[in-house]
Amino acid sequence: MKNVIFVLTDQQRTDTLGCYGNTVVRTDNLDALAASGTRFDRWYTPTAICTPARASLLTGAAPFRHKLLANHERNVGYLEDLADDQWTFPEALKDAGYNCGLIGKWHAGTKKAAADFGFEGPPMEGWHNPVDHPDYLDYLRERDLAPYAISDQMRGVLPNGAPGNLLAARLHQPLEATFEYYMAERAIEMLRRYAAAAETDSTPFFLALHYFGPHLPYIVPNEYFDMYDPDAISLPKSSSETFAGKPQVQENYSKHWAFDTMTEAESRKVIAVYWGYVTLIDEQIGRVLDTARELGLMDSTALFFSSDHGEFTGAHRLHDKGPAMYEDIYSTAGIVRMPGGPEGQERQEFVSLMDCTATILQWCGLDPAPAVDSRSLMPLVMGETPEWDDHIVCEFHGHHFPYPQRMIRDARYKLVINPESVNELYDLKTDPDELQNRYNHPELVAIRTGLMARLYHRLRERGDNFHHWMATMYDVGGLDYDPSLSGFDEAAYSSDEGGGQ
């Protein structure tokens, strides 16, 4: 019998974890998980926005393929739910006899909820803690806990003079009343029930715990709001961003997030509260993992931890995420522990959040083939050294407005294609903060051309039609078809002239 506990946070920076090098933030439980399993150092989200990334985890398909391309709160015309015939892994697990539960954030569709894909658990809609949720309110009443109330709101000023988006606030509730504690309680209850079923009739389980945080606004009780000294925090090096030689949309987003309207001290305090939020969540994850140990599940259960994407917290004079394919929001933490695998392993292969789909299926003894863009990480977690891609490809489709981007990154360089603007090329060895766009630097023409060709061919192999734009606008190497033709004409040309797809 093989079980899974899958923990997913929202909008968490990799550098908030001790096991990834942060020497200040307390993440004892996730650090211990990494020490007992595998930490991936090149783990990427397929796209840095909630709904498309979560849909890719559900389906094992890249966003362009499953076509759920935007969060519904800012959707400007994209689909809002997966197609009725779309394969998903929880449905496959249910068909195989698994108990499947989800506690927390869904945000992978508008009309279709988690229950429509085989999950049980209290349905939770939206992008932030639903503090008006009936089950949460019942939880507070049953325990005579204080209701939700906040003060000390932190925000900047929008370009039109209106108050900016809420970034952080002080929560006037005890720890036990927080939504994060409540979610851990519900997860522990479900875990105990699933463990009993496993003991009684050998029913395996998949339990997902999806936290809404540390997505902004960072709203935490006093202990966590004041846990870290802002005077001891340095702003990200890229907060010196000038946007010179970069797409104009990045500077526009900086104004939208009102970074320059806040003082440096305020920005450092926002980061301090963010770190407090990370510690709060880590402690609650620890309570769930402690229960798994108490129940004797560690020898039969694979443990996963990641985030749907990262967060700027002032990097590049930005907050949240958006149309800028920086490491801050695309490179995320990824930790996997499987019984029998080596402890304290650190892997350097380029992997994706959506690779978890095939990994879950293989661990559970099911066919991973339906997860068409996913590759099982199980060989890596078990200490093997298979051949692996030396690069990662990511995509973006827009937030607030359509904005298509594609990215390829190898061990040193990153190329970003922005059709409406200037492309970007970063040397991550000499410029890890991605401040200097070197796309037009003559000494990097060969690097740029090589990455362009690799990205083009990878997109074409996948069936991502973004490649058509690249074929006519950039040097992508030799072509075996005429890019001035399209659709039926292209097929006819290939047949008549001896070319081919």
Image (cartoon, rainbow, N blue to C red):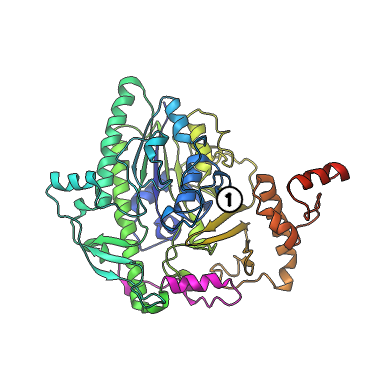
Residue identified by numbered label 1: 350
Residue sitting at x 30%, y 21% = 200
- Residue 249 sits inside the magenta stretch: yes
Does residue 75 appear in this view?
Answer: yes
**Total number of numbered labels?**
1
Point out the residue furthest to the right here.
497
Which element is circle 1 on? loop
Lateral position of residue 69 relative to residue 410, left or right: left
- Quadrant location of the C terminus? top right
Residue 390 at x, y percent in the picture: 64, 51
**301 or 401, nearer to the observer:** 401
Under mark 1, the amino acid is: Phe
Examine the image and state in which quarter residue 155 appears.
bottom left
Residue 409 at x, y percent in the picture: 61, 57
- Quadrant location of the N terminus? top left
Q: Residues within 10 Å of mark 1 (few under 14, many from 20)?
A: some
Does residue 207 appear in this view?
Answer: no
Residue sitting at x 64%, y 69% = 422
Residue 137 at x, y percent in the picture: 19, 48
Examine the image and state in which quarter residue 297 appears.
top left
Point out the residue furthest to the top here.
201
Lateral position of residue 429 relative to residue 37, left or right: right
Lateral position of residue 239 relative to residue 187, left or right: right
Residue sitting at x 30%, y 35% = 191
Residues drawn in magenta: 228-257
